[in-house]
Structures are given as structure tokens and as C-alpha cells.
Amino acid sequence: MTRSPIALRLIEPTLLFDFSISLRLVSRQPSAKARKVSKAKTSPKTTPKNPKASPFDWELGPSHQLPHFAALARYPTPATVWAGWALDGMYFKMNIVGKASPPRFYGNSGGVSDGLRVWIDTRSSPGIHRATRFCHCFHFFPGQSDGSQPAAPATGTLDSIPRCRESPNPIESTMLCVSSQTHGDGYSLWAHVPSECLTGFAPEQFDIVSLFIDVVDFELGTQSISLGPELRYVEDPSLWIRANLINDPLTD
């Protein structure tokens, strides 16, 4: 039996690097192109009543795109993720392609649904191995059904982190602003985490956070920003990536 190059590795290649990224400021003024696309493609069924949840209320352009560090380890990267920040919270966008079936969504019935998972440590403590009250795990769902139940709207939740020392302040899921759109072979998802949902978020005082992101997909597999699924990034903040909050938006 021939083993794949990934199976033959003695050490995860991305563990050899101390990654650091820059998260740029997000503009809340949509471009003329975004307004035009919004009118053409966004229907009342996919646009939440809360204006913050509209994917065209903020700009996430090329300067907000996150690198594919996982490609160093030859992991597939079917999804592209963008991230940014503002004083009113953090913003994310994800686009995934190559799917032949709709994303799975289990709701409260158990099981891990497809979607975007984001871990944030608002005080960036890279030396700790157990989450503190400043560590969060958000799971954003595109809300599509696998066909066994009615389609649900895009939504998000604050998940618990295994082995955490303390938990962040509790929030209501309705405080998270999430929107999604399906396309021919995948979907796009937008999410805004308001500052009141982030315990300890104070970018004017603490301009470095720790961040980790993965995309869960039962059809294409889980894709993380840097590490393979065998490493316990779901519970170990020391494996998350340092992210500098840059107060200097670029013109895309």
C-alpha cells in the first residue's frame, strides 16, 4: 500500500513557523459596485432585517484576504476567507467552491454543521494551552439544509472551548450578524461579531489578538488556516495565529 505524502510526514510543516498576519480596518461605506450587486442579487429572503447583517454594508477586499498557510502542508484549500476589524467588532467573509451538494445544517439536533469557525483571543496570550475568558469560538452557518429538513436562515453561535479555564461572557445568538448566498458550486458567507460579543475586545489598548479559522465541510473536508485536524487547535490557544490590528485600510 502506498501512503500519501501527508501520511508519511513526521512533523506538521506549519508547526515550524511562527505565523503572524495583519488584519486591516474595515470600511462601513459600500462601494458603488457593492450597491449594484446588492440590488441585483440580494433578495428579501436572504437579507436579514438587521442592516448590519447585510453582506454589502461593509467592505472586505483583497487586502483583507487571509493567506493559505495550510497549502504549505499540501492540504486542499477550496475556501477563501477574508477578515477585518473595526471598533464595533470583527468582520469575516468566506467563499467555498467545488461543491456538488448543499451544505449540511443540523441546528440544535446535534452533529457538526458545515460553515465557518473562528477562534479569537482578544488579549493574545500565545503561551497558554487552555482557553481563558478572553478566548472565543464562533460557528457561523450558511443555514442550508441537507434535504431532510426545511432550509434554515444563516445564523451563528458562540461555542464552548474544550478544557477552558474560564468562559467568555455569554451572548445571545441573535446578536451575531450572519448572511449567506449560494452559487452554482458552493456558497458565500458573511459574519459580523459585534464588540459586545467579544469579552476584552479593546483594540485601542490591545492591538494584537490571536486568531484561528477553519471551514467545516462534510463533502470537501475541513480546511484550516494553517494546521491539520489531528492537532488540537480547537482547544489550544498556543496554536492560534497572532493577528495585528492595523488602523490603516488599503484601497482595494
Image: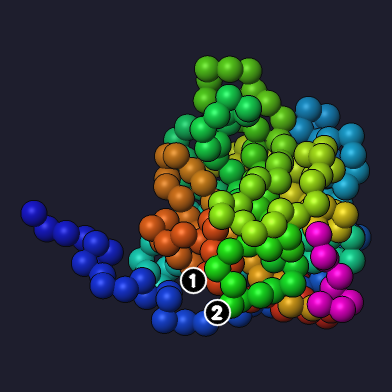
Q: What amino acid is at disc 1?
A: Phe
- Magenta includes 124? no
Q: What amino acid is at disc 2?
A: Phe
Name the residue at 41% across, 81% down. 16
Where in the figure is residue 20, as x and y percent of width and height?
Answer: 60, 80
Q: Which badge, 1 or 2, is on the more N-terminal residue?
A: 2
Q: Is residue 44 above or below residue 173?
A: above
Looking at the picture, tell me which residue is in the foreground, 35 or 193: 193
Magenta stretch in the rendered image: 199-206
Q: Is residue 37 above or below residue 8?
A: above
Q: Quadrant of residue 115?
A: top right
Name the residue at 55% across, 68% down. 129
Would you call the spot at circle 2 few (<14 residues within 10 Å), some (14-19), or many (20 or more)?
A: some
Disc sitting over residue 19 in the figure: 2
* Residue with the mark numbered 1: 69
Left or right placement of residue 225 versus residue 107 in this view: left
Name the residue at 51% across, 46% down. 216
Looking at the picture, tell me which residue is in the foreground, 40 or 160: 160
